[in-house]
Amino acid sequence: MQQGIVRITGKNAVFMDSSLVVSAAYSYHCTKSERYYSRSLLFSSCESIVASPPPSPPSSPLDDSCSGSRKRKRKKKKKKKRLYTPNEKESFAECRHQEVRGDILEAYEAFQATAIPRVKSHAVALRQILPANTTTIVCQEQEQEQEQEVDFVELGKLWQAPLYEITFSQSSERSSGEEEQGQGLRSFTLFNTVIENAIKEEVVAECAGCRFLLPCLCQFLISDINQVHQLVPEASCEGFNLLVIDPPWENKSVHRRALYPTLPNRSLLSLPVKQLAHADGALVALWITNREKLRQFAEKELFPAWGITPAAVWYWLKVKEDGVMVSPLDLAHHKPYECLLLGYLPCQPPLGTDNKDVHGGTADLKHEKPPDKFVIISVPGDHSRKPPLGSLLSGFLPGPKKVKGIELFARELTAGWTSWGNEPLRFQHLPYFRRKTRTTGEA
């Protein structure tokens, strides 16, 4: 539990505290769980307050009598209930749901019986560490911090966008105001530039009047989809063996609430997935919603265009702070889980050689394949923020076992990874983190 992952004994599932998993990658900082779980506070001490609707004004007896005298008695016509007939795609989606329903339910019941007691006890221990007035302090901090956050999508639309810079102002060891003036200051053009933190500890950077925490050995690129080719390595042996892709799928709810800009599905076909992969092959993880239209597009068009061979389907089951699913499992148009499609890119032979002659067709089989219908149970964070997958997928990589990962359409950075998107610093805002407390005698 200290690392944020609880294996559910005897089941093809785990429970993940995403906040703890992210915190484990930092030496001097940890995420604020009350900020990470902004919608569901499993490990937060904030009390959720639900505002009750105002009472409706009482009706006047005089009004009732007058309106009743004027109304004519009419016979109520019984409306015939029309049976809804699902279309072809909805029927296919229901068949998919029924195929995996039993596996998800078994994992969830095992989680309720065995894992949730450990989760709750860990949550109690965390609450005891926090001060009694954390609720008030956190709420005040959130109001101030949200006003200061940078909207990188809107910033990139300004004519001044090419002039913005990000400055590595201080190392994490001097992040409490002990910065040495004139030392270690490095500035980079913010947009359309590959930016790297090449040291083995997190650093604090400043941009547009805000501070951001950059994990160790990470690099990122803030750009539109036309500039992603900057991340293609010069040689395939320097490519990535793990690619995590979380596209901003077209979604009416997202568009209506203006949560983030979406991307036409066919634009994904132009992503240089093959060029980003390592010469020994790569594992690709694609997040996808439960819309059957998107599922068929990914399986029939996207994966073939990228040259990916499907390997398994994982499921992210979302639960609330009390361990209950965020919605009923069989709800027609809103399932409590999302899908993760896993597949492999084949190894790339040297130019002028035949793949079968060089590798004998066995290079892609020298790794353990991921299990099918694996279930990840966790509390969802902010909208579209997915649980970190690096530790769960690291055992299924082809070629070198050392993870060299890249996340496309990222909204946060990962230590040792490359991140690309139009807002990869979205959740790196410094107020999302707090300093780790050190034990007595620790260096």
Image (tube, helix red, strand yellow):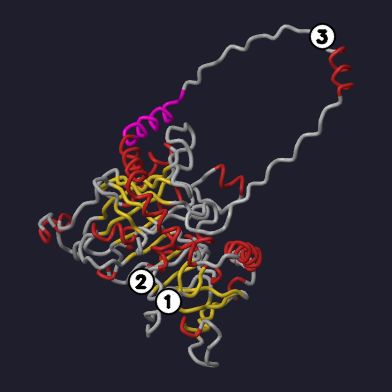
**Is 310 part of what is drawn in magenta?**
no
> Who is closer to the viewer here, 192 or 246?
246
**Mark-to-mark CA distance, 1 and 3:** 77 Å
Question: Which image quadrant is residue 90 in?
Answer: top left
> Who is closer to the viewer here, 44 or 343?
44
* SS at mark 1 in the image: strand
Q: Is residue 341 visible?
A: yes
Q: Which circle's residue, 2 or 3, is located before the other in the chain?
A: 3
211 vs 13: above or below? below
Say which residue label 2 marks. 416
**Is 94 part of what is drawn in magenta?**
yes
Say which residue label 1 marks. 196
**Mark-to-mark CA distance, 2 and 3:** 75 Å
Q: What's the residue at 29%, 53% (across, down)?
A: 7
Say which residue label 3 marks. 72
Q: Is residue 197 visible?
A: no
Please tell me how crowded label 2 is: few (under 14), some (14-19), or many (20+) other residues with Cα within 10 Å.
Answer: some
Q: Nearer the viewer, mark 1 or mark 2?
A: 2
Query: Residue type at mark 3?
Result: Arg
- The quarter in which the N terminus is drawn is bottom left
* SS at mark 3 in the image: loop
Q: What's the residue at 51%, 46% (across, down)?
A: 250
Query: Residue type at mark 1?
Result: Glu
In magenta, the rendered stretch is: 86-101
Q: What's the residue at 58%, 62% (across, down)?
A: 153
Query: Residue type at mark 2?
Result: Gly
